[in-house]
Image (cartoon, coloured by chain):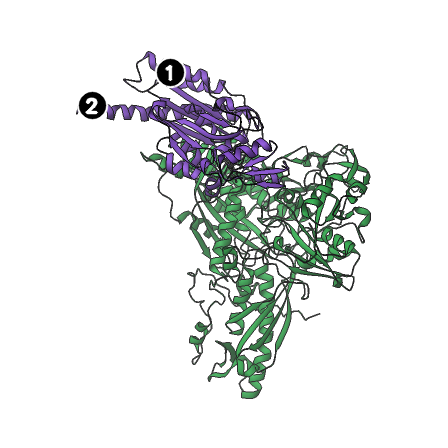
Amino acid sequence: MDFLRPADWSEALEAKAKHPEATPIAGGTDLMVELNFDHRRPEILLDLSRVEQLRQWSRLPEAQGGVLRLGAGVPYSRLIDEVGAALPGLAMAARTVGSPQIRNRGTLGGNLVSASPAGDGHPPLIASGAEVEVESARASRTVPVAEFFTGVKKTVLAEDELVAAIRVPEATGPQQFSKIGTRNAMVIAVCTFAVALHPRRETVGTGIGSAAPTPRAASEAEEFLAAELAERDQWRRPTPLPESVVDRFAELVVNATAPIDDVRGTARYRTHALGVLARRTLGWAWEEYRNSAETAGRQGCA
Amino acid sequence: MSPRSSSTAPTANHAHTRERGAPMSNTHTTPTHRPQHLDEEIAGGVGESPLRPDGSLKVRGDFAYASDLWAENMLWGATLRSPHPSARIRSIDVGPALRMDGVRAVLTAEDVPGRNLYGLKDLDQPVLAEDVVRYRGEAVALVAADHPETARRALDLVEVDYEVLEPVLDAERAAHDDSLPRVHPGGNTVRYQPIVKGDPDAEADVVVSGTYTVGMQDQAFLGPEAGLAVPAEDGGVELYLATQDLHTDRKQTAAALGLDPEQVRMTMSGVGGAFGGREDLSVQVHVCMLALHTGRPVKMVYNREESFFGHVHRHPATMYYEHGATRDGDLVFVRARLYFDGGAYASKTPVVVGNGTTLGVGPYSVPNVRIEGWGMYTNNPPCGAMRGLGAVQPAFAYESQMDRLAEELGMDPVRLRIRNAISRGDSTPSGQVLDYPAPVAELLRRVRELPLPRESTAESTNPDIRDLPGGASNTTHGEGVVRGVGYGVCIKNICYAEGADDFSTARVRLQVVAGEPIAMVHTAAAEVGQGLVTVQQQIARTELGVERVNIHPNDTSVGPAGSSSASRQTYVTGGAVQAACRAVREQVLERVAQRCGDPVERLSLSGGKVVSETSGVLADLAEVLGSEVVEATREYHHRETFPLDEQGHSERAQVQHAFSAHRAVVDVDTELGLVKVVQLDCSQDVGKAVNPDAVVGQIQGGSAQGLGLAVMEEIQVDGGRIRNPSFTDYLIPTILDMPPMNVDVIERGDPNAPYGVRGVGEPPTISSTPAIVAAIRAATGKALEHVPVGPEHIVE
Ligand SMILES: Cc1cc2nc3c(=O)[nH]c(=O)nc-3n(C[C@H](O)[C@H](O)[C@H](O)COP(=O)(O)OP(=O)(O)OC[C@H]3O[C@@H](n4cnc5c(N)ncnc54)[C@H](O)[C@@H]3O)c2cc1C
């Protein structure tokens, strides 16, 4: 096995162009497991850990609307510490990943490219409307996270492409993420749900994990809720959501899933649990929104 | 053969509780001039908690485990395993594998030099499969190669032609349906045992019944199976390995290799946990075959996935129970049928049936009993020893039944248990009278009195999610969370039973090194993490009054110690070390007695001195010893046990019983079915806490393993295949799942046991599971007849 260690991003792209069969390795927390199980036998490993650009994050110019650009190689522990306030949904998800050791090494780029249906990073990114910055020596492009996955463990990446970064719009409203596991830590998700309220755009984002071959948004639930909120002028004058709205939202979330039975849980349980998570997370997000609106209102009067 | 020690008189037979570390009460008069102060100069004797000699190494990561073994010029072994639960082997072609670069040997059943059969109780398991395979994962061929990866890849080139057969998968059906294929020529029943007492058809005012099932649990030890075999000049082999029982391994390995036991010399290498999973052979014969065949050292080490196929698991069980009681809550009868799935080979199935049936009513006094137990062959993964052997499964059932009965009677479940608790002088269903303390009622009272945790954080306005079910996964902020409290109590037999001659051997040597008297203790008793090395040191310090005690590596150059299982080593090996130390002491004192005229009975060893009761310090031990080496080897045999007859009767089927009681407090998210065990408390009688810290450690660890069975640990088997052979999907509790514990240790010495000890390791694994499930039931109102309890059982 050959081991390539590009010193920077352009070297990495060149190496990948020259050896399209090379398998990139970032934190190695997915790849090393695959190698140990002999599920993969790459001829060449392309080690990205020396590429400084991948380990940086930045705020894009305000003109682009408050977007954070997260290098694909920023580990979860830094996402929690450094961008947790701007991206609370992603930080909540990051806190549920593995153990402290895994969070120190594991990266969002690796999580995306592994394309496990149970990748915990995916739902909050989808709920936030994030995009994946993909680059090759030829060109670069951005792909909405929801379109990045084409199947179980499959993505849109061409063989000479690498993930450079993930562009995530900064939160403008409450975000929540919940993960069901049968252990209180270090567990692969039975199912996950993310919700993000976008008061400025007056839209709602959602993300569902582990309940279909690829993570996905519950688009009908998003549209239903956004319409309800708009109709009752809830964004400006938020009141407690009627039970019927919360129930319908949960129902539409459940309708968006296509779960299976596997060692981690039954399809029936996943469906049930997602309904509960949808209701709870929306409840928490909406309460937070109402509280902040109230505070803002009071400050406005003072 | 060394002489048997005269069954050593116990030094402790207390019927009262002692605070940790407080001195033992003495019933006889303490003589004057007794230099007590010197006693205290020897730190780390029996009853104290000195540091483990291997502790710092393990914590620092410097301890060498069997998987770290290395020899110059060694080869790596790998095992080809059956992909089918049941198949006939038509042919095996090793040619392509043998031609691969770097491959040094490919061996099959034909290459087994000796007897191609082994087994702990029944000789029914081939070293390598001959004509049939009986489970998915059965060893079929071996490869030795220059590199582990080469060996692994060569396995793919071994061509085995299988004719796939219909597997037997249902143990209960196998017990009654003769039309099923026979897994072994003798039929599918490994052992059937009934236990009948009183009138088995008795009737009662109040009757409750239930069907309970226990999933297949794994020992999940962290250090995988590993060994290094080095061919020896005499045609024999030196095997370095991790095991629970060197001599039983040696006996089986030598027979399979066609060698004399003396030609197979085994040395214990670092054991990374065992819990019963290292009682059966794994790499032993295989790695020796490869080494003898190639004439080179060969190492084998399983990876985590292979480990799931390379050792036995806990028997899954289906149990039908019926309890009858008077309106006042006195048990009238217990009737039960227990089916244990032993999988493809017998392993410890006979013992599981023996323990399961004899202990099947729990720690209760029941006048009328009929329990039947079946241990069956199937084509599922083989099951054998695991902590709490055969007692774990029925405990889940009988404790669930006690709660059900309490509910039916409208009675407090702890009161019902106390009312029916067995105690000293009572007899078990097999007719054995408990002639030692059996403080079951006291344990229940004590555990109930232990402090309870704060009220559920779910009640507070701003709970920390990490304290709630789901933890940092943020699934609830208090919604749906209900608290429940539950109790469980159990009985477990200690040491081997039903007529087995259970003994251990110790060699103790006392000599002066660099001016200081040093004792060396040599046994074959496996240190599997329980702290036996420390216990041996403590006993030698106490008996010989010396500070420095070295522990010789475990090997087969000393007599057998038996297995580190059945909670028996502090009892039997502790007994052997005590006896050997006393024999050494006697030799030393006799010398002084001759010189000084004081009778031996008046002399003792203390603080490195020879002390006389009447005239104080007589001499320095170092001086007395001079350049001499005083050595003694002793065996310790516990009192005899006897087999069960056809009605399940025996005057003494088991040598000793141990008891523990748990209280569990859980928070359950009743809408999502997620559980957080908030607190798990235990009261246990340990007879005598030889090392109080180690005792508490055993209780914590055992409770964690019981928690695992209660809420997450299950090998999922489908069509004879394991679906989750990894720590990704076979979940064991993490530090965030295991709550703080109040551990209450009492010491009611067993007059038959050295120092009054009572086995410690297993009971907490047994009573914790039913306590936790009872607590979940209290929170949810669900019947919960299967462990582990999964979220879907709670919400559906
Ligand atoms: C014990 C344990 C617990 C875990 N728990 C969780 C969990 O709770 N939730 C969860 O979602 N995951 C979990 N994982 C999986 C894993 O940690 C995550 O998916 C992690 O984000 C992977 O990141 P990495 O940097 O380690 O990826 P790597 O293993 O380095 O790579 C993963 C894949 O991505 C490719 N790749 C990496 N970087 C790039 C790039 N820049 N461009 C193109 N391709 C790239 C690699 O070629 C490989 O195919 C766990 C893993 C372990 C071992």
Residue corresponding to mark 1? A226
**Residue B216 in sight:** no
> Residue B387: which disc?
none
In this view, B396 is above or below A190:
below
> Residue A300: which disc?
2
Residue B225 pos. (x, y %):
64, 50
Q: Name the residue type under label 2.
A: Gly
Q: Which chain is purple?
A: A
Q: Nearer the viewer, residue B72 or B668?
A: B72
Q: Quadrant of residue A4?
A: top right
**Residue A150 in sight:** yes
Residue A156 pos. (x, y %):
55, 24
The residue furthest left is A302
Q: Callout 1: residue from which chain?
A: A
In this view, A113 is above or below B331:
above
Q: Which chain is green?
A: B
Q: Say which quadrant the C terminus of chain A sits in.
A: top left
Q: Nearer the viewer, residue A263 or B324?
A: A263
| Mark closest to the chain's N terminus, 2 or 1 | 1
Residue A275 pos. (x, y %):
45, 23
Q: Name the residue type under label 1.
A: Ala
